[in-house]
Image (cartoon, rainbow, N blue to C red):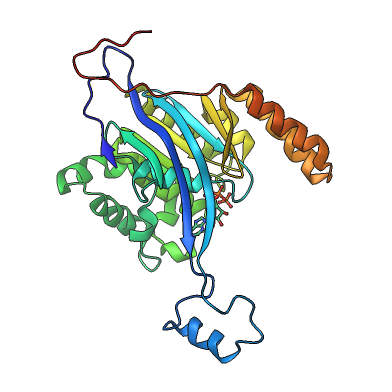
């Protein structure tokens, strides 16, 4: 990930700039012959299709440009496999685009503390662990600890081992930990889908606070009410294409129609909507400043 070095203050205040970024995964469907799975497949060569390793490519994201400003909360919607997580990983710098570039005004934080959390430890202990894993100092942790427990709102369950939590309870805890470090850019991938209405209310409050502190939040979600309630803008991805980038009401209206047609197996009508969205999409072009020259627009 390239950190932005330009002075954007005179133009606007972008938090993330995606400049023609695309992602193609390359993989060997036959697997590595040295792995356990590879050895098993080798014993049944005639029965397993594609047992011979051959390079396959998955075009997860086609070239896409967008600018996310400070103060925005952006919902990322789309069917399974449409490229949402891939875009988030590119934004967080977890993977490098195979084309184009991604710039961020500071390192985006993905709600990724789950990896550091330990199911056998209590919620409280996991708060300590998660915060330290995100690089918080002891002093910061002490000052924020009570606020995190309050935001998680797990009451007495906070003393129970995390393995006893429902997915909604785990989501509360993970969100409370991740949102505690006031990240300038926060990426929430599916984290809030399992929360109930009460938790969504708390989340909205915290997300509004983050945005007011000039943060920028990306929220990947299949829950349209969540996106509608929490986001100021939506991005709709479909089979690696950007279909919509704009205010939520209009995009969600067409997305709901699109998914309804697909569920009714009316592919023709769904395709019509897809074409319409692509036609209406206003292409974003990232202007690169040339040193010593004025931008002429
Ligand atoms: N590491 C990987 N290697 C190969 N292909 C991948 C990899 N990760 C994702 N893909 C493929 O890229 C495409 C986009 O996947 P991605 O996870 O970004 O979609 P998504 O919109 O987040 O899906 P979902 O809603 O199901 O989480 C899919 O076809 C997926 O199979």
Q: Residue at x 16, y 49 (%)?
A: 138
Question: In which quadrant will I find the C terminus?
Answer: top left
Visible residue check, residue 191: no
Count of residue discs: 0
Q: Nearer the viewer, residue 268 or 189?
A: 268
- In the displayed structure image, the side of residue 2 where residue 212 appears, left or right: right
Visible residue check, residue 81: yes
Note whether 91 is above or below 233 in the view shown: below
Q: Nearer the viewer, residue 236 or 256?
A: 236
Note whether 73 is above or below 34 in the view shown: above
**Quadrant of residue 273 in the image?**
top right
Q: Nearer the viewer, residue 76 or 131?
A: 76
Q: Residue at x 36, y 38 (%)?
A: 101
Note whether 277 is above or below 163 in the view shown: above
Note whether 47 is above or below 218 in the view shown: below
Q: Residue at x 44, y 23 (%)?
A: 285
**Quadrant of residue 176 in the image?**
top left
- In the displayed structure image, the side of residue 147 where residue 240 appears, left or right: right
Position of residue 17 measured from the top left corner of the image (x, y, whole percent): 37, 30
Position of residue 94 measured from the top left corner of the image (x, y, whole percent): 35, 50
Q: Residue at x 30, y 35 (%)?
A: 182
Question: In which quadrant will I find the N terminus?
Answer: top left
Q: Residue furthest bottom?
A: 43
Position of residue 249 measured from the top left corner of the image (x, y, whole percent): 64, 23
Position of residue 238 measured from the top left corner of the image (x, y, whole percent): 62, 41
């Amino acid at each position: 990930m390239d950190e932005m070095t330009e002075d954007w203050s005179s133009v606007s205040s972008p938090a993330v700039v995606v400049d023609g970024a695309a992602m193609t995964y390359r993989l060997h469907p036959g697997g590595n012959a040295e792995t356990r799975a590879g050895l098993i497949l080798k014993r049944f060569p005639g029965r397993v299709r594609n047992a011979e390793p051959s390079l396959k490519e998955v075009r997860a994201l086609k070239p896409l440009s967008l600018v996310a400003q400070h103060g925005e909360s952006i919902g990322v919607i789309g069917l399974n496999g449409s490229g949402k997580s891939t875009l988030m990983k590119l934004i967080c710098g977890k993977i490098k685009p195979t084309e184009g570039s991604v710039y961020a005004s500071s390192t985006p934080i993905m709600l990724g503390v789950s990896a550091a959390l330990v199911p056998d430890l209590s919620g409280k202990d996991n708060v300590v662990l998660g915060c330290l894993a995100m690089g918080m100092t002891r002093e910061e942790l002490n000052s924020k600890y009570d606020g995190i427990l309050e935001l998680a709102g797990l009451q007495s369950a906070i003393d129970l081992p995390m393995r006893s939590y429902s997915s909604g309870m785990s989501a509360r805890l993970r969100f409370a930990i991740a949102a505690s470090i006031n990240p300038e850019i926060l990426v929430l991938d599916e984290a809030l889908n399992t929360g109930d209405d009460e938790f969504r209310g708390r989340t909205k409050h915290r997300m509004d606070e983050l945005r007011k502190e000039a943060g920028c939040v990306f929220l990947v979600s299949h829950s349209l009410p969540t996106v509608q309630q929490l986001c100021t803008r939506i991005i709709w991805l479909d089979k690696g294409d950007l279909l919509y980038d704009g205010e939520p009401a209009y995009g969600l209206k067409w997305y709901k129609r699109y998914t309804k047609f697909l569920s009714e197996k009316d592919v023709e009508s769904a395709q019509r909507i897809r074409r319409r969205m692509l036609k209406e999409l206003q292409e974003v072009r990232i202007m690169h400043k040339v040193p010593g020259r004025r931008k002429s627009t």
